[in-house]
Image: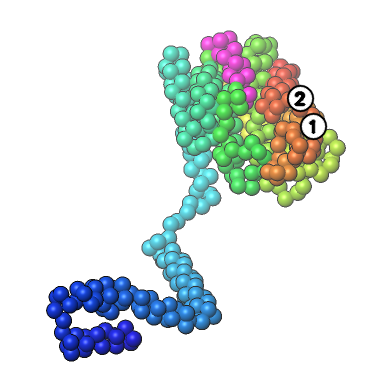
Amino acid sequence: MRTVSGLHTSRLHFRQAPLTGRRLAKSQSPTSLPNSRKDLRRPLQASSAEGHGSQNPDQKDEKVQEALKRAQEGLTSAESSLSNLEQLPSNRVKKPSLVMTNIRRLLIVAALAVGFNTTQRVGLTWQIVLATLGGCGFAGYGYRKGSLSPSGGIAACFVGAATLATSLRIGLCLLSFYYTSSKLTAFKEEMKNVDEEFKKGGQRDWRQVLCNGGIPSVLALCFGVLTRCADIPLSSQQAFWPTAFLGAAIGYYASCCADTWASELGQLSEDTPVLITTLRPVRKGTNGGVTKLGLMASVGGGLLVGMAAYLGGLLAPTVADVPSAFEAARAQWPLVPLGLLAGLFGSLVDSILGATVQFTGYNRTSQKLTSKHGPDIVPISGISLLTNNVVNLVSAALTALLMASMCIAVF
């Protein structure tokens, strides 16, 4: 109001005493006029400052709290609307049941078995070519799913090609181990992040692939050279070395599968693991720690490989098409319990080695298990003599020797 009244008074002054241009220049400069921008800005700023200063801080806080309350109510309403939208029949996505999922997996396994059976009927050259393509395909699938690193995928190509080209029986053991282990590694993996070396999906590199598949690939090649890449029934009298190589390959995969099953499922157990050497309670994920669930899982892994070896012998064309060979292979059902024993033996040996010659510590900074020493590391068990990959290799190799001896003795 003061600004407006002052401006009005100045206008009245101009009406009463009009000035010429010369007198205006002498008496008042344009900047001294009360209606100039500079003079008008000062009263406006003062009025604005008075207006702001007149607000109570408590009123400000109340307005802020009221605005936040309205925003929270709006967010809650939006979430409720979204939840109602997801419950609409038109927006529901039907998830496959567990039964249908298992049926689909069985159909995939059956299709693979038929496919590899077909590769055994097209001649040795095409058998090698198709096996190589199949091995590369499985390696690419593992890389895409995240279970293999780039180096692991390359190593898996050689392992798959060498194994699938020489023996349907050993090939089924490999596929059973690889497929189930990949699924179990991804199963509830958010609960398994207790180790500093944890990788999402497993991400097995070339070292892990060769430790799990390098030796059985060599055994499969030796078997293929002796039998011209044709499966035959186990017989220590008629085919001593093929029986030994085949039994060793089956035992190796039984140990690897049992150990992986025990590791992946044992960590999900509600029981506290105990160190296999002292029965002392330890943290989950500790090398050498065992649980009832883990031991049962190792039995299941060995049993799976034993069944794959037995069924592979029945499905192989060089066995199935020859009545006498088929009858001999059908009588070799002891492969199933032998696979079970091999898996359990390999898992126990792996646990004993892990508890004694493989170091496990607890990092107080990261609050995770580690295989490295340091100022913040609390030792739990073992000494730093072997790495995890070497422990797996040694335990599987010992199991392979045992299984080869048992196959020679039984068959």
Q: Is residue 196 visible?
A: yes
Q: Is residue 338 visible?
A: no
Above or below residue 10? Residue 193 is above
The secondary structure that most of the magenta stretch takes on is helix
The C terminus: image quadrant: top right
Q: Position of residue 357 (x, y in %)?
A: 78, 27
Above or below residue 45? Residue 314 is above
| The quarter of the displayed image where residue 294 is located | top right
Q: Amino acid at mark 2?
A: Leu
> Residue at image x 50%, y 28%?
150
Comparing 50 with 349, the one in front is: 50
Q: Position of residue 399 (x, y in %)?
A: 72, 24
Single out the residue that lies furthest toward the right.
278
Comparing 199 with 250, the one in front is: 199
> Residue at image x 29%, y 85%?
6
Question: What is the crowding at mark 1: few (fewer than 14 residues within 10 Å), some, or many (at least 20)?
Answer: many
> Residue at image x 84%, y 40%?
279
Dot 1 corresponds to which residue?
Answer: 382
From which residue to which does the magenta span run? 211-228
> Residue at image x 81%, y 44%?
281
Question: Which label belongs to residue 385?
Answer: 2
Q: Secondary structure at mark 2?
A: loop
Comparing 270 with 194, the one in front is: 194
| The quarter of the displayed image where residue 407 is located | top right
Q: Position of residue 8 (x, y in %)?
A: 25, 87
Above or below residue 87? Residue 175 is above
Q: Position of residue 245 (x, y in %)?
A: 64, 16
Q: Marks 2 and 1: in contact by CB < 8 Å?
A: yes
